[in-house]
Image (cartoon, grey):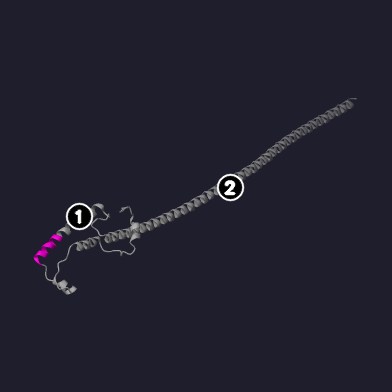
Amino acid sequence: MSTWGGLRPQAVLCLCPSVPLQTEPKERSEGAGLEKVMPQPVTREKQDTQGVATATSSPVEQKINESQINEAMTAWAHKAELQADAHSLPTIQEEPQEEETRLCLGSTNTAEEEEEERKKEEEERKKEEEEERIKEEEEMKQDEEDRKEEEEERRKKEEDIKTEEENREKEEEERKVDEEKDSKKEEEERKEEEDRKKEEEERREEVKKEDKRKKEERKKDKEKTKEEKRKEEDKKEEEQEESAE
């Protein structure tokens, strides 16, 4: 920010509280300074409005006026060049009151711009803080949802593992029961086979015994028949012997 005479614009603003602020463009202020330097020719219109009885400018007065106008134009051009080079720096051609007024106006505008810029920066900062807060809340909410989803997935996985383990144990128990049933059935079948074999053996033994018994009976019958036949022959011989005597 530019300074003048070692004073900042805010300091000048404090030195000229009673000076009315000018809201007119810079060109008009410069024109006003030119009007002060350039004397205006007296005309009849001015006589009518001001009530002063003056005559129309003479050739000598017009020549003087033209010389003054040229000098004023030169001074104004030089002042404009200085203002263009130094931007907001005051020039030596300005009167103290105009200079203070311009500085006060510039200081006021600068203060208003700085206040507006400060408010804008504050609003942007609040907006950024609000956006950051919302973003953090959304991230925290998303993290919480992700954590809940992970917890739910972990719980579901544990339940699935537990269910699989229970099913495996149940299948193992059923397999053992089936094995026991199969083993029992095999034992029963083995026992039945043994019983069947035993019965078959017994039946064979009985058949053998029956065959033996029958054979013995036939033998006895044969011996009996033979004995009877021998007795019959012996009886016949005895009868023959008796007849011979």
Residue 225 occupies which quadrant of the picture?
A: top right
Name the front one of labels 2 and 1.
Answer: 1
Q: Which residues are magenta?
A: 58-68
Percent coordinates x, y for residue 104 in the rendering: 31, 60
Percent coordinates x, y for residue 1 in the rendering: 32, 53
* 166 and 115: which is toward the camera: 115
Please give left or right for residue 123 compared with residue 208 in the image.
Answer: left
- Number of marks present in the image shown: 2
Q: Amino acid at mark 1?
A: His
Please give left or right for residue 215 compared with residue 108 in the image.
Answer: right
Q: Residues within 10 Å of mark 2 (few under 14, many from 20)?
A: few
- In the rendered image, the vertical position of residue 164 relative to residue 9, given as above or below: above
Percent coordinates x, y for residue 96 in the rendering: 27, 59
Q: CA distance from mark 2 to mark 1?
A: 99 Å
Q: Reading the chain from its start, which is encountered first: label 2 or label 1?
A: 1
Residue beneath label 2, please?
A: 163
Is residue 29 located in the magenta-colored stretch of the structure?
no
* Identity of the residue furthest to the left in this view: 59
* 167 and 91: which is toward the camera: 91
Residue beneath label 1, please?
A: 78
Q: Amino acid at mark 2?
A: Thr
Secondary structure of residue under mark 1:
helix
* 142 and 50: which is toward the camera: 50
Residue 73 occupies which quadrant of the picture?
A: bottom left
* Majority secondary structure in the magenta region: helix
- In the rendered image, the vertical position of residue 145 relative to residue 177, given as above or below: below
Mark number displayed over residue 112 = none
Secondary structure of residue under mark 2:
helix
